[in-house]
Amino acid sequence: MSNTIGRARANFLWGDAGLMPLTNKRAIIVKGRRLVAPQQERNLLACLHGNNLGFAVPYETLCAALGYGRPTRKKKHALQQHVVSLKRLLDSYGVPCTITVAHNVGYALCPVRKAKK
């Protein structure tokens, strides 16, 4: 697997404060490793992150970020496939976040907190 990736619309670094935007890089960095992902998954992550972290992002916004335009049933299914792929990718990098579905609204990227003992 290559360590190089194409341009990303938004760039992130996973640190103590969670996923933080990077302004001077053109890659998504997770725990010191370059995130190797297709452009659409990177666009989806950029859309779910930032001011939207923890909040539902409407299907319309997510479909637009993927270049799909208006969210039809077929396009929502394609969006769902990208979300599943992004969930697996975040899990493989050990990012303590999950993507949840808000039925008839969209998706949200939510940080997962460790349970107190």
Image (tube, rainbow, N blue to C red):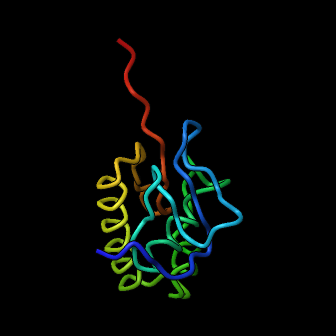
Q: 53 or 28: which is nearer to us? A: 28
Classify 70 as above or below 96: below
Instruction: Assign the N terminus to one quadrant of the image.
Output: bottom left
What residue sits 59% from the left and 38% below the top? 17
What residue sits 53% from the left and 74% below the top? 43
The residue at the far top in this view is: 117
What residue sits 33% from the left and 78% below the top? 77
Classify 11 as above or below 109: below
Q: 9 or 108: which is nearer to us? A: 9
Residue 39 percent location from the top left of the image? 47, 80
Q: Dividing the picture into quarters, in which one does residue 56 lie?
A: bottom right
Q: 91 or 51: which is nearer to us? A: 91
Residue 11 percent location from the top left of the image? 60, 65
Q: 115 or 95: which is nearer to us? A: 95
Classify 31 as above or below 114: below
Residue 25 percent location from the top left of the image? 64, 68
What residue sits 29% from the left and 60% below the top? 88
Instruction: Assign the C terminus to one quadrant of the image.
Output: top left
